[in-house]
Amino acid sequence: MTSNSVFLVNKGFDPYPFILLNLILSCLAALQAPVIMMSQNRQEVKDRKRSKQDFMVNLKSQLELRMLHEKIDHLIIH
């Protein structure tokens, strides 16, 4: 864009509104959008699995704590 507007002054191959540049950037965005969406979907699946695994670990630790409390209560009573 700089070479087109500064060095080539009035003889630039793409005059001021830069239609060719806009076309190239639009095509690039159209090609990148599906790739970005697919990677976000894969990341979402990984996050969902990780959160489910975290939930299971937390549930197991909660059950272990509950058992320990019951054992301590049993020891205190006896």
Image (cartoon, helix red, strand yellow):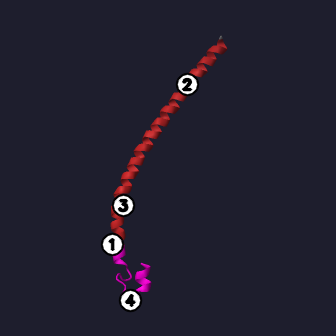
Instruction: Say which label, 3 or 2, has the lower sequence index.
Output: 3
Label 2 neighbour load within 10 Å: few <14, some 14-19, many 20+: few
Please give the residue where the numbered disc 1 appears in the rendered image: 23
Which structural element holds mark 2?
helix
Which structural element holds mark 4?
helix
Q: Which residues are magenta?
A: 1-21
Residue 64, label in figure: 2
Please report the residue visible at 59 percent of the width from the left and 19 percent of the height from the top: 70
The percent position of residue 9, horizontal first and vertical second, equals: 41, 87
Which structural element holds mark 1?
helix
Q: CA distance from mark 3 to mark 2?
A: 48 Å
Choose top left, top right, bottom left or bottom right for residue 64.
top right
Q: Amino acid at mark 3?
A: Gln
Q: CA distance from mark 2 to mark 1?
A: 61 Å
Label 3 neighbour load within 10 Å: few <14, some 14-19, many 20+: few
Query: Which residue is situated farthest in the top direction here?
Result: 78
Residue 32, label in figure: 3
Q: Amino acid at mark 4?
A: Asn
Please give the residue where the numbered disc 4 appears in the rendered image: 10
Q: Amino acid at mark 2?
A: Glu
Q: CA distance from mark 1 to mark 4?
A: 21 Å
Residue 11 included in the magenta stretch of the image: yes
Vertical relation: 13 (above or below) 48: below
Instruction: Say which label, 1 or 4, has the lower sequence index.
Output: 4
Please report the residue visible at 36 percent of the width from the left and 73 percent of the height from the top: 22
Task: Indicate which label's residue lies in the foreground, 4 or 2.
Answer: 4
The percent position of residue 49, horizontal first and vertical second, equals: 43, 39
